[in-house]
Image (cartoon, rainbow, N blue to C red):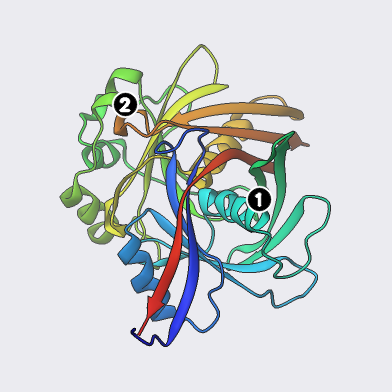
Amino acid sequence: MANYRLERPYVVVDVFTKTQFGGNQLAVITDARGLTTVEMQRIAAEFNFAETSFVLPPVDPENTAQVRIFTRAQEVPFAGHPNVGTAFVIARERILVGAFEDGCMRFEEAAGLVEVRLVRDETGVQGATITAPRKLEVGALIDPAVMARCVGLDEDAILLDHHKPQSASVGLPFFIAELDLTSLSRAHAVLGAFSEAGIGQGYADASGRFSAFVYARLGEGHDRLRARMFAPLSGNFEDPATGSASAALGAYLAKLNPAPDGDFRIEIEQGVEMGRPSEITLDLRKSGGEVRDVKVTGLCVQVMRGVLTID
């Protein structure tokens, strides 16, 4: 029998769904002690999911865990579905890393401290609600023609009635644009256009990330949306559920709302065109004209478990 330097357990869950093989896949390495950053990146590439999370003991024992998140190509400071799924796995697997009381967790991440509250019913833990680690940050505008080329559409497909294509972040930046439903269904990532915009025209961030999050309204207002996320420069041509992008979009739309104060709920469906339908719920609080609280809720379902072996 082979002798391995390390053996580490993992659990794979589908996030932002109640049904197996829907939502967004996530591999959670439930004990990442002893793994180097290079090994974590290689493991994430091996799973080939949008993201893989690695659970480590917290620096501050008052927190629940340190969580590191990797895409296929790079580490990211914050992401939505890895936090929801990691909390679900920690609770279901009864992993005791650091402090964990009354259904609340705190994850140490590069973007800051992420607060998590478990979602339960009479049968047990079903998912989680996370609070975005940072306030809304509105960044650069992007030329509508450039955004349209990136998602394979004509410039007039970009709707400008409510806002221009805009970078927004509550922990991880995304360029956001509104489409109609027909254009949304036709959208697709064009790698050459992403490369030209991200690298050639400087829209990528310092790590080389350049992500486009496009959405359409499902009614008269902005409380029900359908969205798609493309990030081919990070190896993710399309993502079936993007909690961090949804949180940024929701915060941006709440900021645009003329009401200076209020609570808002936004339901976002994503992954429909990929055959992996996802449901993301946002709850936002606005006070004094500023969006001060952004919460993302999703359900999860376990798919598999196993042991990772490292030579």
Give the residue at mark 1: 135
| On screen, residue 278 above or below 9 | above
Q: Is residue 60 left or right of residue 55?
A: right
**Residue 9: image location, x then y, percent:** 50, 68
Q: How many residues crowd mark 1 within 10 Å: few (<14), some (14–19), many (20+)?
A: some
**Secondary structure of the residue carrying numbered label 1:** loop
Res. 263 image quadrant: top right
Residue at figure coordinates x 46%, y 16% from the top left: 218
**Residue 181: image location, x then y, percent:** 34, 19
Which label sits on residue 184? 2
Foreground of the two, 123 or 156: 123
Q: Specify the quadrant that holds the N terminus.
A: bottom left
Q: Is residue 165 left or right of residue 136?
A: left
Which label sits on residue 126? none
Q: Specify the quadrant that holds the C terminus.
A: bottom left
| On screen, residue 204 above or below 143 | below
Q: Do the residues under discs 1 and 2 have CB atoms within 8 angstroms? A: no
